[in-house]
Structures are given as structure tokens and as C-alpha cells.
Image (spheres, rainbow, N blue to C red):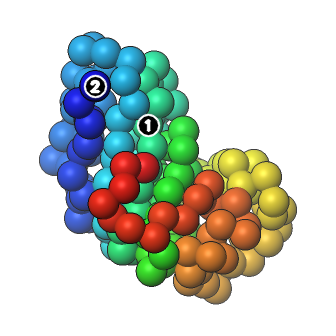
Amino acid sequence: RAKRRCMPGFGDLDEAEQERICKTIWALNARSREPIHLMIHSGGGRVDLTHKVTGVLSESVAPVSGFVYGICYSAAFVVLQSCHHRVAGANSTFLFHGSTLGSLRIDQKDFEERIRSKRQEHEDEVTFIAKRSGKVSAEQVRQWSQEERKFTAQEALEFGFIDEIQSSLGKSP
């Protein structure tokens, strides 16, 4: 019987967490093609750091299942959508929204370009979420993003944001 290959849940996505996730997935892929379980409980983090994580997830030869056992907000929601299989505990909640502009100052020379870039980044995420869902339009995703709507696990399943609900944490995703 193969060992379960689980990565523990993470908090906010910061540089250290991004590196830990990416290095662990690379290392697990180097060992075998057995499934990897990414446990998620996160209020979000820096959306700009999701790109490396989602890239590694999409290129993983070993299938990666994302398992939400609590909250999956903001950047964590984008990471979950990049997993091959998405599972949630029955009491999990989900939320996505546009990224903040952080330290952007209005007097920066590249202010307008950075605004355009952030808008395009958000539009790419909206399109990706809608496509991954297979059940909702980009326009609907955009509206929910603006509203910062929270979703129950059942709603997430109905809208295609997860693939299944698991009633017990003791079961393998």
C-alpha cells in the first residue's frame, strides 16, 4: 500500500508558504506519481504569489487533490481551483475577490500600467474560475467577486468550485 502523501494545511499565502508548497510538490513528484493531497485552511494571502503555486500544480505529474477543511478564501481559492480534484468538508466556506493594490502609490510613474496589469490579472482569474467551474459564466464570477460572496460547501459543489463534499476528515480525499 502506498503512503499517503499529504501536505498540511496552510495559513496565509506568503513567500515562505509559496516556496514550501512548490518545493514539496516538486519533491513528491520526483519520488513517485502517487496522488498528493494538499490540505487547505486559509484566509488567503498574496494573490501575486498564487501564479507559481498554480503553475506547479498544473504541471504536477502526480495528481493533486485539494482538500478544504475550513475556510478557503481569496488566494487559497485560486490555488484550490488549480488542483486536479477538489474536495471539501461539509462545513467549509469559500470566497474569492479581486486583489488589493497593496503599496501602490498614486504618484508612481508606472501607476496606470500597474492598474491595467492588476485588472488583466483579475480578469484572467475570473475567466479561469468560470472555465474550471464549467457551470457559471465569467460575468457571474465577476459579480460574485465584486460582492465578496461567501459560499457554503454545498453551493461550491453546485457551482462547480469543488468536485465533492466529504463528511469526515478521517477519509482520504
Q: Nearer the viewer, residue 88 or 18?
A: 88
Q: Position of residue 37 (x, y in %)?
A: 35, 43
Q: Is residue 108 left or right of residue 83?
A: left
Instruction: Look at label 2 and name its amino acid.
Output: Arg
Do the residues bearing badges 2 and 1 touch, measured as CB atoms within 8 Å? no
Q: Position of residue 127 (x, y in %)?
A: 72, 52
Q: Position of residue 114 (x, y in %)?
A: 51, 54
The numbered disc on residue 22 is none
Quarter of the picture containing the N terminus is top left
Q: Is residue 159 left or right of residue 23?
A: right
Q: Position of residue 39 (x, y in %)?
A: 32, 54
Q: Nearer the viewer, residue 96 or 49?
A: 96
Which of marks 1 and 2 precedes in the sequence? Answer: 2
10 to 4, vertically: above or below:
below
Instruction: Look at label 1 and name its amino acid.
Output: Val
Q: Residue at x 63, y 70 (%)?
A: 156
Q: Residues within 10 Å of mark 1 (few under 14, many from 20)?
A: many
Q: What secondary structure is marked by label 2?
A: loop
Q: Marks 2 and 1, Cα distance to the nearest angstrom?
A: 18 Å
The numbered disc on residue 1 is 2
128 to 57, vertically: above or below:
below
- The residue tagged 1 is 64
Q: What secondary structure is marked by label 1?
A: strand
Q: Nearer the viewer, residue 113 or 56?
A: 56
Q: Nearer the viewer, residue 128 or 10?
A: 10
Front of the two marks 2 and 1: 2
Q: Residue at x 26, y 36 (%)?
A: 4
Q: Is residue 80 left or right of residue 42?
A: right
